Amino acid sequence: MTTDKIFLHKKDIKEIQSVLEKFPDVETFELDQEGGNGIGTFTSMTFDLEINGLHGSFKIEISGVEDW
């Protein structure tokens, strides 16, 4: 079993909460971090949702270069 660490700032947690408030039917989501080359990382959350009978996947940026 492997583990990967994701580092989140308090601001990231607040942004995740804000997104969840806009999509109240979302119960689970995935967090991804890209980068880690010493400069900074991009953090995003992804979740699947059905809206008006259409299934879709949403990928929302939580933090990016503006946070470096």
Image (cartoon, rainbow, N blue to C red):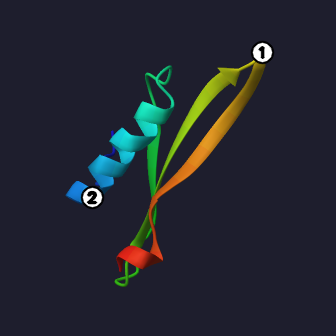
Q: Position of residue 6 (x, y in %)?
A: 31, 55
Name the outermost residue toward the top.
Answer: 53
Q: Position of residue 40 (x, y in %)?
A: 37, 77
Q: Position of residue 41 (x, y in %)?
A: 41, 70
The C terminus: image quadrant: bottom left
Identify which residue is drawn at 41% across, 32% down.
Answer: 21
Q: Which mark is residue 35?
A: none
Say which quarter of the image contains residue 65. bottom left
Where is mark 1, residue-wise? 53
Res. 51 in view? yes
Say which quarter of the image contains residue 8. bottom left
Judged left or right of residue 13, residue 67 is right
Say which quarter of the image contains residue 20. top left
Q: Is residue 22 above or below residue 55?
A: below
Dot 2 falls on a residue whose secondary structure is helix
Res. 4 in view? no
Query: CA gap, disc 2 to disc 1?
Result: 33 Å
Identify which residue is drawn at 27% across, 58% down.
Answer: 11
The N terminus: image quadrant: top left
Where is mark 2, residue-wise? 11
Identify which residue is drawn at 36% across, 74% down.
Answer: 67
Judged left or right of residue 20, residue 13 is left
Q: 41 or 54: which is nearer to us?
A: 54
Label 1 environment density (alpha carbons within 10 Å; few <14, some 14–19, many ≥20): few
> Marks 2 and 1: CB-CB under 8 Å?
no
Dot 1 falls on a residue whose secondary structure is loop
Amino acid beneath label 2:
Lys
Amino acid beneath label 1:
Gly
Of the image marks 2 and 1, the number of the one nearer the N terminus: 2
Identify which residue is drawn at 29% across, 48% down.
Answer: 14
